[in-house]
Image (cartoon, coloured by chain):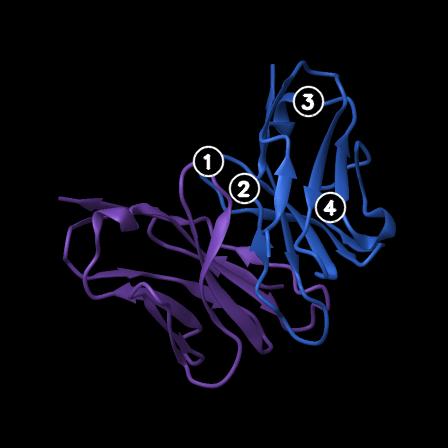
């Protein structure tokens, strides 16, 4: 168990640029989640994958955001035409599948700063 | 819809004193409850969880929380805190009718332990 890995840890970019983050979940974890955390707040749910299928998206996930999980392993989160309000910590979490709620394991996040 | 309220944004306490971090949730159906801890520039680490069974749950580092269904609360307690317990603590809820088991977080409580 090597834990959830996220890359990069920090990303600084100019407004209007596109950015992509990567998440490698714990191996054999079927469920993968993306959350966004702004300063002084708790994480907010963005989207959820069960294997390779994206089963739920939050209203926070505007059409500038897209997430994928090809082959049901790693996942990417892309933000197009970034805006100042996109500045936040983006957290990825994974958990085993099956019935019921298993504790989610979080990565250390990617901190995005928009200049 | 589910929600979580953490009334105290910051709790200052002296080392070796007891502490209670309050968490109340709102849900019309059975839920799963969690406490996570976050250190600066890191992701969230699971502290303890209530899934079913005994309403009192304990962690390996001395924290405990009690699920109170009638008061819809899941307060976190520790009888004697250490400097190293200084961190942000988040209460979260999942489950009910939500098949994704995404986590709904409170806004967090910063525990500040002073010598």
The residue where tag 1 is placed is: B41
Would you name the residue on which mark 2 appears? A108
Label 3: few (<14), some (14–19) or many (≥20) C-alpha neighbours in 10 Å: some
Residue A4 located left or right of residue B22: right
Chain of the residue where label 1 is placed in the rendered structure = B
Please name which of the two marks, 1 or 3, marks the residue nearer to the observer: 1
Q: Of label 2 and label 4, which has the lower sequence position?
A: 4
Colour displayed for chain B in the image of the structure: purple
**Residue A103 in the image: x percent, y percent?**
57, 64
- Residue A59 circle label: 4
User: Seen from this angle, which residue lies furthest front?
Assistant: A1
Tag 3 residue: A83
Question: Quarter holding the N terminus of chain B?
Answer: bottom right
From the rendered image, report the letter of the chain displayed in blue.
A
Q: Is residue B78 left or right of residue A99?
A: left
Mark 2, chain letter? A
| C-alpha separation, residue under disc 2 versus residue under disc 1 | 7 Å
Tell me if mark 4 has few (under 14), some (14-19) or many (20+) residues whose alpha carbon lies within 10 angstroms of its own. Answer: few
**Residue at coordinates 76% horizontally, 44% vertically from top-left?**
A75
Q: CA distance from mark 4 to mark 1?
A: 26 Å
Q: Do residues under tags 2 and 1 come within 8 Å of each other at their CB atoms? A: yes
Residues tagged by mark 3 and mark 2 found on one chain of the structure:
yes
What SS does tag 3 mark? loop
Instruction: Please state the horizontal and vertical placement of residue B109, each as a whole percent of the image.
Output: 36, 49
Indicate which label's residue lies in the foreground, 2 or 4. 2
Near-viewer residue (B53 or A6): A6
Is disc 2 in contact with disc 4, using a CB cutoff of under 8 Å? no
Circles 4 and 1 on the same subunit: no
Residue at 69%, 16% in the rendered image: A15
- Which numbered disc covers residue A13? none
């Amino acid at each position: 168990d090597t834990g959830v890995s996220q890359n990069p840890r920090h990303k600084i970019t100019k407004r209007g640029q596109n950015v992509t983050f990567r998440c490698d979940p714990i191996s054999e974890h079927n469920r993968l989640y993306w959350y966004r955390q702004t300063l002084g707040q708790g994480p907010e749910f963005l989207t959820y994958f069960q294997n390779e299928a994206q089963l739920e998206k939050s209203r926070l996930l505007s059409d500038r955001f897209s997430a994928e999980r090809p082959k049901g392993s790693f996942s990417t989160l892309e933000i197009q035409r970034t805006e100042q309000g996109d500045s936040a910590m983006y957290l990825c979490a994974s958990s085993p599948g099956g019935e019921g709620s298993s504790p989610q394991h979080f990565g250390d996040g990617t901190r995005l700063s928009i200049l | 819809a589910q929600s979580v309220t953490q009334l105290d944004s910051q709790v200052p306490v002296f080392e070796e004193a007891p502490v209670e971090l309050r968490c109340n949730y709102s849900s019309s159906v059975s839920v799963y409850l969690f406490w996570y801890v976050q250190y600066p520039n890191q992701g969230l680490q699971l502290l303890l969880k209530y899934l079913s069974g005994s309403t009192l749950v304990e962690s390996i580092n001395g924290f405990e929380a009690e699920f109170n269904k009638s008061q819809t609360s899941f307060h976190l307690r520790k009888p004697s805190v250490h400097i190293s317990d200084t961190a942000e603590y988040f209460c979260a809820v999942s489950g009910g009718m939500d098949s994704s088991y995404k986590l709904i977080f409170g806004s967090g409580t910063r525990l500040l332990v002073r010598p």
